[in-house]
Amino acid sequence: MTYRFPLQRVLDVKEKEKQQAQQDLGVSLKKQHDVEEKMTALSEKRTTIQEHMIQQSRGCKALELHDQQRYISHLDRQIVLLQKNLLQTKKEVEKNQGVLMEKSKEEKIWQEWKQEMFTRHQQVALKQEQEMLDEMASIRYFRKRNML
């Protein structure tokens, strides 16, 4: 007698929801990593230009210094925007982590319920089998006894 969990479809849905939550978390973590990389690259670029500007400030034209300063200001604005973007992606990651935790809990509950129902099924099957064996033993005993 094989066991079939009556709510297997619900369990399958819960597993798929958990997988989707894992994928969403992965996407948001990748976004966060990309933003962090862009921010690091811009910060390094800004530092390099600023160092270059300081080195050439003595023999450089005022117009070139002004252009470099405008470019540094532009990089600063981009860094600020990326910082805001990073904050949003961190919030998204936290939200997706919460969703994943919730979906994992739901799936675990359903898995435990399935296991509990399977255990009950096994116990019932073993009891029925034992009753059948007891009945067969009783029948043999009475047949042997009547034959003597």
Image: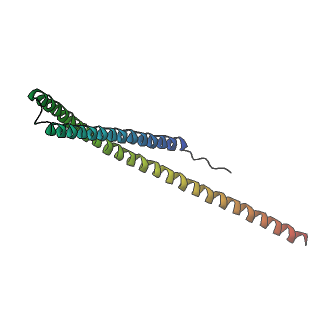
The C terminus: image quadrant? bottom right
The residue lying at 62 percent from left, 57 percent from top is 122
- Vertically, is 136 above or below 108? below
Whether residue 83 is visible here, answered yes or no, is no
- Residue 134 point in image, percent of width and height: 74, 65
Task: Give the camera-side residue of 130 and 23.
Answer: 23
144 vs 129, left or right, is right
Residue extending farthest to the front is 59
Task: Give the camera-side residue of 69 and 16.
Answer: 69
User: Could you say which quadrant of the image residue 91 lies in?
Assistant: top left
- Residue 62 point in image, percent of width and height: 8, 29
The residue lying at 23 percent from left, 40 percent from top is 43
40 vs 62, left or right, is right
- Vertically, is 133 above or below 19? below
- Residue 107 point in image, percent of width and height: 46, 48
- Vertically, is 144 above or below 34? below
How many labels were placed on the picture?
A: 0
Whether residue 133 is visible here, answered yes or no, is yes
Q: State how the image is colored.
A: rainbow
User: Could you say which quadrant of the image residue 83 lies in?
Assistant: top left
User: Could you say which quadrant of the image residue 147 lies in?
Assistant: bottom right
- Residue 127 point in image, percent of width and height: 66, 61
Residue extending farthest to the top is 63
Task: Give the camera-side residue of 137 and 52.
Answer: 52
